[in-house]
Image: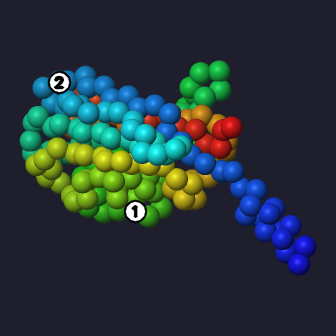
Amino acid sequence: MKLLLWIWVLLIGESHEYVRLTNLKCESFDKSYIDFPECRLKVLGRGIIAANIHVKVLKLPINRMVIRFITYRKLNGYHPFLFNVSKELCRSLKHPNRLDVFYWFYTAFMPYSNLNHTCPFNNDVYVRNCTLNDGMFIKVPLPKGTYKLTLDMDDGIETWVSIISIYFDIDVD
């Protein structure tokens, strides 16, 4: 009985893994195309931090948008780490690829967003009360540390119109 208790403590009870949002920044380079009326973190409870983003699209409909997805790890400043992927959003939503890293992150954030259909987009994009949990990083195991995830958006005419930076910690005490 003691052996089973020790195995449980070692495998389950001692797990202190957690993922926590630390900062959120939204910047628009072309205010006539995209604006961010809301871009903030909200405390939902003790240790539970959620992201709220409202992307107001001023030139509708959106038929083409390129998203550049980059992860950075903090080691004496933020340095590129593991992923630097550019995807055409409309094509990726219409033909999802389960082996693509963009698909993994998109499915993790999809329950919190209204971005659940393919192009054309005729409305604003909302992300409401998006919290991170350990299960989101099962397919992409990241080591302990501080990370920054950036989403750069292109209007389809080779002009970067906005950038969203999401800062988070993984298992940092």
Residue at mark 1 to residue at mark 2: CA–CA distance: 32 Å
**Please, is residue 99 above or below residue 81 in the view?**
below
Question: Element at badge 2?
Answer: loop
Observer-nearest residue: 90 or 32? 32
- Measured as percent of width and height from the top left, residue 13 is found at 74, 61
What's under tag 1, amino acid-wise?
Asn
**Residue name at image x 31 percent, y 25 percent:** 27
Question: What is the total number of numbered labels drawn onto the structure image?
Answer: 2
Find residue 97 and name its label.
1
**Crowding near pointer 2: few (<14 within 10 Å), some, many (20+)?**
some
Q: Are marks 1 and 2 in contact (CB under 8 Å)?
A: no
Say which residue label 2 marks: 31
**Residue name at image x 36 percent, y 48 percent:** 129
Q: Nearer the viewer, mark 1 or mark 2?
A: 2
What's under tag 2, amino acid-wise?
Lys
> Which quarter of the figure has residue 91?
bottom left
**Please, is residue 134 above or below residue 167 in the view?**
below
- Measured as percent of width and height from the top left, residue 21 is found at 49, 39
Observer-nearest residue: 90 or 14? 14
Question: In what quadrant of the picture does the N terminus appear?
Answer: bottom right
Question: In what quadrant of the picture does the C terminus appear?
Answer: top right
Of callouts 1 and 2, the N-terminal one: 2
> Which quarter of the figure has residue 170?
top right
Question: Element at badge 1?
Answer: loop
> Which quarter of the figure has residue 107?
bottom left
- Measured as percent of width and height from the top left, residue 118 is found at 21, 58
Find residue 82 and name its label.
none
